[in-house]
Amino acid sequence: MQRLIGLLLVACLAGGVSSCATQGSASKSQSPLPAARQQLVTDLSQCTKTFGYDPNNLTGMAENQLAPREIEWRQCGYDAVRRYARSQPTLTGLYDQLINEDITMTNAVQAGTITRSQRRQRIEALISELKSAEERQVQVTAIKQEEQMERVRQVVEGMRGLR
């Protein structure tokens, strides 16, 4: 399913929001991110069911043309990504950039001025940036949680002296 997310953002925002794939177990249990990721996968699957377009299963399409219902699928995918981006407010700008560039490049594919492969390449690069940014954010959150736990431990230890 993460590959489907991937192909949202590479072949229809389709490529790899599996960009949002790994994080430590400590932060998983305390973060809304895993649930948001699963919702993104579910939303993208629903887009595929609704519009009958599957970016993972394209055959016989010219490199410089759009598939039937692709634009509708992409709009649905953009909405799904925007909802997901709400779980990552500090990264909203990168998600907006991903969507805006995908829209621009999709128009260029439709006009025949770039190919699907060229669009896919650029989207994959943006997804890679997003993945790195999310991983950094997860690490920062984990460090902050550890620092908070250490402060709590220090308070508890200090209060034990009051006995």
Image (tube, rainbow, N blue to C red):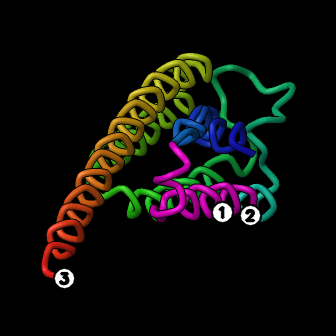
Tell me which corner region of the image, top left, top right, bottom left or bottom right, holds residue 136.
Answer: top left
In the displayed orientation, state which residue is furthest to the front: 163
Tell me which corner region of the image, top left, top right, bottom left or bottom right, holds residue 101.
Answer: top left
Between discs 2 and 3, the one toward the N terminus: 2
Q: Residue at x 48, y 65 (%)?
A: 32
Q: Position of residue 33 (x, y in %)?
A: 49, 58
Q: Nearer the viewer, residue 83 or 140?
A: 140
Q: Residue at x 67, y 46 (%)?
A: 70
The residue identified by callout 2 is 46
Question: In the rendered view, does 26 fall on the left or right side of 150?
Answer: right
Q: Are marks 2 and 1 in contact (CB under 8 Å)?
A: yes
Tell me which corner region of the image, top left, top right, bottom left or bottom right, holds residue 151.
Answer: bottom left
The residue identified by callout 1 is 43
Question: In the rendered view, does 49 fall on the left or right side of 144?
Answer: right
Q: Amino acid at mark 1?
A: Asp
Between discs 1 and 3, the one toward the N terminus: 1
The residue identified by callout 3 is 163
Q: Residue 12: within the magenta?
A: no
Report crowding for label 1: few under 14, some 14 to 19, many 20 or more residues within 10 A (C-alpha): many
On screen, residue 23 above or below 28: above
In whole angstroms, how far apart are the C-alphas of marks 1 and 3? 55 Å
Residues rendered magenta in the picture: 24-45
Q: Are marks 2 and 3 in contact (CB under 8 Å)?
A: no
On screen, residue 81 above or below 124: below
Q: Residue at x 75, y 57 (%)?
A: 45
Q: Position of residue 73 (x, y in %)?
A: 65, 54
Report crowding for label 3: few under 14, some 14 to 19, many 20 or more residues within 10 A (C-alpha): few
